[in-house]
């Protein structure tokens, strides 16, 4: 039961953090490349890599806490659906080069972020 509560609380904080950061970034950048979702997903990949790597070696983090952070907070903080929707919107606007750059940069930098996070 503690794991469920941890995931719920982590999810609440992750969603609120994402909402806050998205609003702050969108207020500073013009429309075009989806900077907010890109940065959120990259930092989320880094954090998830870090949390799971830090939790593994000596079980320094209890399973319920790892779930609360990894599944709850980071799961609500990052978003695949928004990434796909923004990509489709760029396609609809005929901004195909920006769409391809966004998709590829998210994949490459996201994988790199997860790798760096897991190595720290």
Image (cartoon, rainbow, N blue to C red):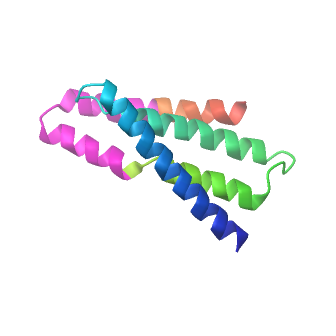
Question: In which quadrant is the C terminus drawn?
Answer: top right
Decide which of 80, 1 is in the foreground and name it: 1
Q: Residue at x 72, y 56 (%)?
A: 65
Task: Report the magenta stretch's main SS.
Answer: helix
Residue 58: x and y, percent?
A: 87, 47
* Rendered location of residue 1, percent (x, y): 70, 74
**Magenta span contains residue 96:** yes
| Looking at the image, residue 85 lies above or below residue 72 | above
Residue occupying the far bottom of the picture:
1
Residue at the spot 55% in from the left edge and 30% down from the top edge:
112
Q: Is residue 101 left or right of residue 2?
A: left
Q: Nearer the viewer, residue 67 or 87?
A: 67
Q: Residue at x 27, y 48 (%)?
A: 85
| Picture layout, residue 89 above or below residue 65 | above
Q: Position of residue 40 (x, y in %)?
A: 46, 37
The answer to whether residue 14 is left or right of residue 4 is: left
| Residue 50 position in % (x across, y down) | 68, 39
Inspect this view and state whether residue 22 appears. Answer: yes
Q: Is residue 94 above or below residue 73?
A: above
Looking at the rendering, the stretch of residues picked out in magenta corresponds to: 81-108
Residue at (35, 52) in percent of width and height: 81
Q: Residue furthest right?
A: 58
- Residue 87 in which image quadrant: top left
């Amino acid at each position: 039961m503690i794991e469920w509560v941890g995931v719920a609380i982590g999810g609440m904080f992750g969603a609120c953090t994402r909402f806050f950061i998205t609003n702050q970034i969108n207020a500073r950048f013009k429309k075009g490349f989806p900077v907010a979702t890109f940065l959120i997903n990259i930092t989320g990949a880094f954090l998830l890599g870090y949390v799971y790597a830090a939790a593994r070696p000596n079980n320094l983090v209890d399973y319920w806490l790892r779930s609360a952070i990894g599944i709850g907070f980071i799961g609500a903080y990052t978003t695949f659906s928004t990434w796909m929707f923004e990509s489709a919107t760029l396609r609809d606007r005929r901004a195909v080069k920006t769409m391809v750059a966004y998709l590829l940069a998210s994949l490459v930098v996201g994988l790199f972020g997860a790798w760096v996070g897991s190595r720290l």
